[in-house]
Image: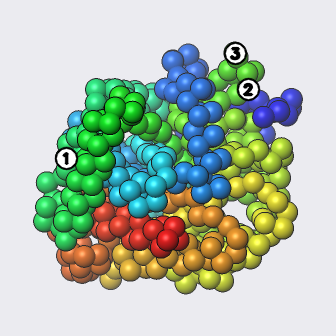
């Protein structure tokens, strides 16, 4: 990627930056950014480039991207069980997807840094009083007390250390053989045997194990390769001071990388072309995701792509559509056609979560599994009908048995939601619902391959 010489990791500061906290003591904030900048990176440029190459392959259907995790990670999520469960669900879903598609699945977590959230409103009412909203653990506290909602720069340092513990544990699990395909039952979560999908899942696992045994007895496979997977991290590049501090110039290529995560995405609320978030992402060589809501116009999208990817590099941009079940048919065909016409290189992914959020009467945010499945199916069909390829999917999910989205095989109803509603931001698919969706995608892909 060639660099624009006027760009620097700090050049976003000349532009309008939405969704940034206002710190009471800017001197302290800058000092903390300096400290962050002196700490070692969490990922390595070579890994980031590898991921970009895989995303490029996914654009042509050579790989399939599974990106998922929490809407917002909490510092308290940095514990053995929560991290392991998230990795387990992503591994299990990827087994199903790999088996159905015959394609390698690129696994990207919304993990190890997903600590900042864009919000639609600056204040919320608590006991009749307006207090500032929660913006993620990297900024303020979830506790609904005005004083706790004051942004504190020291939380950015904490974010770094929680992200580094999380990524360290993921790397250790993978290096230690946790993701070894010889032992897929390691990834079982207690709930799977209670779901209708257990038989289907264990059938796939047994077939994979048979194939491995056959290949091993035949002697021709590099079996140690089956013990290793690659796992990548991603988060929304929202808090630009933090992202700037995690940006380093690679001594080998001379390019700038955000080394706080492998992939960074730009959210639906901060994707304006003359804004600070786009300016920041323009200069880093990481693969960049762009969330696309229903208000995106063809011209806006084309201009954004030309700006962020002037050399039309493959793998650089993933377009993550989150149009909602009521808009996908109206909006997606036009966007695909104009990108095809202009021959712009993008990898298409679908986030069927964020366009389908609804509020219950009690004010709980929820999403219905039927809407999620329908948006996913329709997105898949529209890509097929318009000579494009859906290269991946993007979910908010958890390995825990939460009750945040309605429907699914367990048929959760609105009145069930309060039973175990844990999300501090958007509602996530629970374990059974995530597996169900993996099987649905597998069916769609399989049909196409037949
Ligand atoms: C998110 O991914 O949590 C999010 C806020 O998404 P979007 O920018 O698409 O609304
Ligand atoms: Co969300």
Tag of residue 251: 3
Which of the two residues, 122 or 386, is positioned nearer the viewer here?
Answer: 386
Is residue 62 among the parts visible in the rendering? yes
Disc 1 is placed on an element classified as helix
Residue 441, above or below 3:
below
Residue at position x 13%, y 65% from top? Answer: 194
Q: Quadrant of the N terminus?
A: top right
Q: Is residue 403 above or below residue 39?
A: below
Please tell me how crowded label 3 is: few (under 14), some (14-19), or many (20+) other residues with Cα within 10 Å: few
Q: Quadrant of residue 165?
A: top left
The residue drawn where x is 62% and y is 82% is 329
The secondary structure type at the circle numbered 3 is loop
Residue 185 disc label: 1
The residue pinned by badge 2 equals 255
Tag 2 or tag 1, which sits nearer the N-term?
1
Q: Residues within 10 Å of mark 2 (few under 14, many from 20)?
A: some
Residue 237: name its quadrant: top right
Q: Indicate yes or no: mark 1 CB to ligand 2 under 8 Å.
A: no
Q: Do the residues labelled 3 and 2 touch (CB within 8 Å)?
A: no
* Residue sitting at x 46%, y 55%: 102
């Amino acid at each position: 990627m060639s660099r624009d010489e006027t760009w620097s990791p700090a050049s976003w500061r000349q532009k309008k930056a939405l969704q940034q906290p206002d710190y009471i003591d800017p001197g302290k904030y800058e000092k903390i950014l300096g400290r962050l900048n002196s700490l070692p990176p969490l990922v390595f440029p070579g890994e980031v480039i590898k991921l970009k190459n895989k995303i490029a392959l996914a654009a042509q259907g050579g790989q399939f991207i599974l990106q998922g995790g929490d809407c917002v990670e909490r510092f308290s999520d940095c514990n053995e069980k929560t991290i392991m469960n998230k990795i387990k669900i992503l591994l299990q879903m990827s087994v199903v997807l790999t088996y159905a598609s015959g394609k390698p699945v690129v696994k990207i977590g919304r993990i190890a840094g997903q600590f900042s959230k864009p919000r639609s409103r600056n204040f919320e009412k608590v006991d009749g009083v307006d207090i500032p909203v929660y913006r993620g653990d990297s900024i303020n506290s979830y506790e609904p007390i005005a004083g706790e909602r004051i942004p504190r720069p020291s939380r950015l340092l904490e974010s770094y250390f929680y992200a580094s513990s999380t990524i360290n544990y993921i790397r250790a699990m993978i290096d230690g053989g946790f993701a070894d395909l010889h032992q897929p039952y390691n990834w079982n979560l207690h709930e799977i045997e209670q779901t209708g999908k257990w038989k289907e899942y264990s059938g796939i696992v047994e077939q994979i194990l048979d194939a491995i045994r056959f290949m091993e007895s035949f002697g021709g496979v590099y079996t140690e390769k089956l013990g290793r997977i690659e796992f990548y991290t991603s988060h929304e590049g929202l808090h630009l001071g933090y992202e700037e501090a995690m940006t380093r110039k690679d001594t080998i290529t001379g390019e700038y990388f955000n080394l706080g995560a492998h992939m960074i995405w730009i959210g639906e609320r901060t994707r304006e072309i003359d804004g600070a978030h786009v300016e920041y992402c323009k200069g880093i060589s990481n693969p960049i995701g762009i969330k696309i809501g229903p208000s995106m116009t063809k011209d806006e999208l084309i201009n954004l792509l030309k700006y962020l990817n002037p050399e039309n590099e493959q793998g650089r941009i993933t377009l993550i559509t989150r149009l909602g079940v009521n808009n996908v048919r109206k909006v997606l065909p036009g966007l695909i056609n104009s990108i095809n016409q202009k021959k712009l290189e993008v990898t298409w992914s679908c986030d069927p979560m964020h366009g389908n959020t609804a509020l219950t009467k009690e004010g709980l945010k929820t999403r219905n599994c039927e809407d999620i499945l329908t948006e996913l199916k329709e997105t898949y069909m529209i890509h097929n009908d318009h000579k494009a390829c859906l290269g991946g999917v993007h979910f908010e999910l958890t390995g825990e048995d939460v009750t945040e989205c309605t429907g699914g095989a367990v048929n959760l109803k609105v009145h069930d939601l309060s039973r175990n509603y844990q999300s501090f931001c958007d509602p996530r698919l629970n374990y059974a619902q995530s597996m169900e969706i993996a099987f649905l995608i597998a069916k769609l892909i399989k049909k196409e391959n037949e």
